[in-house]
Image (tube, rainbow, N blue to C red):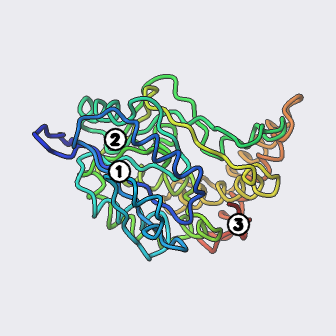
Amino acid sequence: MAGRVQAGVNMIKVSAIIPTRNPRKDYFFRVLDSIAAQKFGSGESELLIVDNGSTPPLAEWEELSARPGLRIIREEKAGCIHARNRGWRESVGQLLVFVDDDALLCGDYFAKAWEIAVQFPGLGCFGGSIHLQCEVEPEAWMLPFLDSLAARHVTRPVWSNNHQWNTIPYGVGMCVRREAFGDIVESLEEMAEFSVTRGRRKGARLGSSIADDAVIGFLMCDKGWGCGLFPELSLQHLIPKARLERDYLIWLSCSNGYREKTLEILRGLNKPFWMEALRSLVFMLAGLKPGVPGACLHIWAKCRGEWMAILQGSGPSVEKKPAFH
């Protein structure tokens, strides 16, 4: 399947969509500044903010009223999937760029994303490199955990339509062809009811896990679309101090392991019990690396989440999420 992007006068090409709930103000306005700095054709892009239950509502922020060219939409149904779906329904652009409320787009992100969409009409979604900009310098033991915070370094273009984890973009800065998203929107609503997408909104802010994002890529492949990663797309992911605390990092690794394994179970991709046990053992042994503090702790937390999913099936969320701001 392939989708063609159309050229035309005064046509919206790119819709930037920010799903958010109670965003941190200093981060949020840096995000808006990075979008405003995009060099793209006049009138060829739009910005939608999907407020997923902020208190007070973002529409009441005086600082936002002074910024021209943005629309604020209120979505009361909780969850990132519902917020993204609402953004798709309200937007008009041929290419959607989902921007987290703590992600700074680097360079000409819109222009490069549009070029990729034109060059690769069979791609339903794609992304690029994600670099972490931490509020405090991570300690050495934290380094193995940073992948759980969606850090990703893309060195060459890769794409596939074969349900491969290593070609599916994370939600931070994910670019989605409008036609392709329309093909999966009903399935996304159904997936939102499973545990793989539950429990992500227990804190004050809105978030999605790597597995939640992978749902989009897997469904795209089901419909014949491809997924890809491109080094020319790059962004900075702002990480507050609270997300580098030990309890949060352990919870995040465990939660990601649980949700990724639950997604595999729901998709029928899980391996026989003995193979899962052997894989976990190999992972644990691999974590015992001299000079890599925290590696074994990270792998233990992720394996713990995976085994909770294996033993519980698609049951409730594994743990209460530590609140952070």
Q: Residue furthest top?
A: 156
Based on the displayed image, in which of its 4 quarters is residue 162 positioned? top left
Q: Residue at x 71, y 66 (%)?
A: 323
**Which residue is the site of mark 3?**
321
What percent of the width, then of the height, locates residue 109? 39, 34
The alpha-carbon separation of the residues under discs 2 and 3 comes to 33 Å
**Which residue is the site of mark 1?**
220
* Quarter of the image where the N terminus is located: top left
Mark toward the viewer: 3 or 1: 3
* Mark 1 crowdedness (10 Å alpha carbons): few <14, some 14-19, many ≥20: many
- The amino acid at mark 1 is Met
The alpha-carbon separation of the residues under discs 2 and 1 comes to 7 Å
- Examine the rendered structure and indicate whether residue 240 appears above or below residue 105: below
- Examine the rendered structure and indicate whether residue 155 appears above or below residue 92: above
Q: Residue at x 70, y 55 (%)?
A: 252
Helix, strand, or loop for circle 3? loop
